[in-house]
Amino acid sequence: MYQWDFYTVLQSFDLFVIGLWVTFLYTIGSISMGIFIGLLTCYARMSSSILLRTIAKTYQEIFRCTPLLVQIMWAYYALPLITGYSISNSTAGLLTLSLYVGSFYAEIFRGGVNAVDKGQTEAALSTGMSKFQSMQFVIFPQAIKKMLPAFINQSVIQVKNTSLLYAISIGELTYMTSVINSETYRPMEAYSLAAVMYFLMLYPLTKFADHVERKLSKSD
Amino acid sequence: MNDNTNSILSARGLKKSFDKLEVLKGIDLDLMPGDVVGVIGPSGSGKSTLIRCLNMLEIPSAGEVRFKNRQVTNKFKLSGDGIGTGELRKKVGMVFQHFNLYPHKTVLENITQGPIVVLKETRELAERHAMELLEKVGLLDKRDVYPSHLSGGQKQRVAIARALAMRPDALLLDEVTSALDPELVGEVLQVIKELAEQGMTMILVTHEMGFAADVANRIIFMENGVIVESGLPSDLLQSPQTERLKSFLARHLRHSIR
């Protein structure tokens, strides 16, 4: 029978807390920037300019068709070799995370907007609104309802994506766990504790997502 | 047909194709102030496409549309001659077959949305006007209700009020009763009739022949993307000149119960 020994691991609980906080920061940071990038990209995809549409689609394909870990490594190690400027691991990490989730958000926003009946756009335009105004007052408010479950889902995934930053030595939860492990040689306890902490973070979020989904289907 | 600079809306040589399918094959049309023009014809004749070209919801493949003798372009804002869609659609309103009310806004908000955002009216002014219009269409008590709680006839009356809120010079009505249960059609036709009597310039695509005959001062019969016959309702409906109109009327009146 394996002898559990959480005591040794819990000695470094302060490291876990720091890791949790850093995870939280990168999550909030990348989600906020990702929303902004996603909105821009969504609007570009719907633009009448072929150039804008192509740039947006290319960006999305690159970030959706390559692994996040590879992107993170590339941003930190390879990009400086091309540009001649080195960037801090935190900059590389935040940038990559934001661009990654932004490409997915853009797709979710597009899906939401496309799910709104075409007649709504026609009605708005027929009163003299510009395309942007029709988006702002008529389409997007309705699209938000339709995209909320997918959006929350993607955001939950994003929390877990921050764990990949450990590969470039950013002190988020997974990195801290590996540090504790290398000090205590108790991977079982360390990583079980880490898993529990991620779970405690994300379970309320998924419950919230279910609640939102139920409330939305009621108001239909 | 001569170039009539007094017309509110006019079309010359209007053509529209969707991919390989030519839906409008060259339409000339003049809508004069106070005109109520009924457009009738079989499905696929291009009736809806025609009026959708008039406010550029469809972009013509050829030909031109003029609003008060200014050429309509597909751009939103225009400097110089001509008129852009932003300005045009303030002056030419549209009512749709499937209502297209904004489900996330109340009846009142549906009506005030355009005036507030596009005409930059204050909320008070927009709401006051909206309530006058709701009174006119008989739905003042529904002003804080959401569209999902309305019947089809009520939704369409709200849609008409929403179009009127922009104080348009003309209205385009695209089969506005076709999606309604028969017993709800009357209340909408009543509103349209009152608008006609008050002098609103309208062009209505409709299957309600009796109504068109009653309210319109001119009827246009379309088939296969062309105007086949055009003239006074009594002339067209009682003494059709072409075989196509004769057989259309025979088919249609045979099926109508009214």
Image (tube, helix red, strand yellow):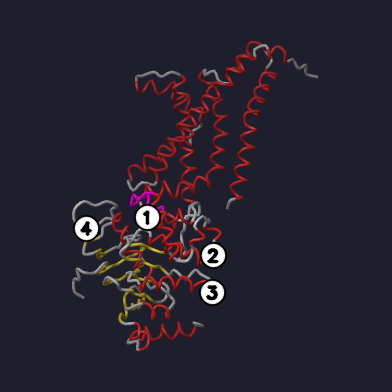
- Mark nearest the camera among 1 and 3 is 3
> Is there a contact, CB below 8 Å, between mark 3 and mark 4?
no
Q: Magenta segment range?
A: B112-122
- Asked whether the residues under marks 1 and 3 belong to the same chain, the reply is no
Provide the chain ID for the residue under circle 4: B
User: Does residue B26 appear in this view?
Assistant: no
Q: Which class describes the residues within 10 Å of circle 2: few (<14), some (14-19), or many (20+)? A: few
Cα–Cα gap, marks 2 and 4:
40 Å
Q: The residue under label 3 is which amino acid type?
A: Glu
Specify which label sits upstream in the sequence, 2 or 4: 4
Q: Going 18% across and 71% down the picture, which residue do you hit?
A: B3
> Is there a contact, CB below 8 Å, between mark 1 and mark 4?
no
- Outermost bottom residue: B239
Which residue has dot 1 on it? A125
Query: In the figure, A66 relative to B67: above or below?
Result: above
Specify which label sits upstream in the sequence, 3 or 4: 4
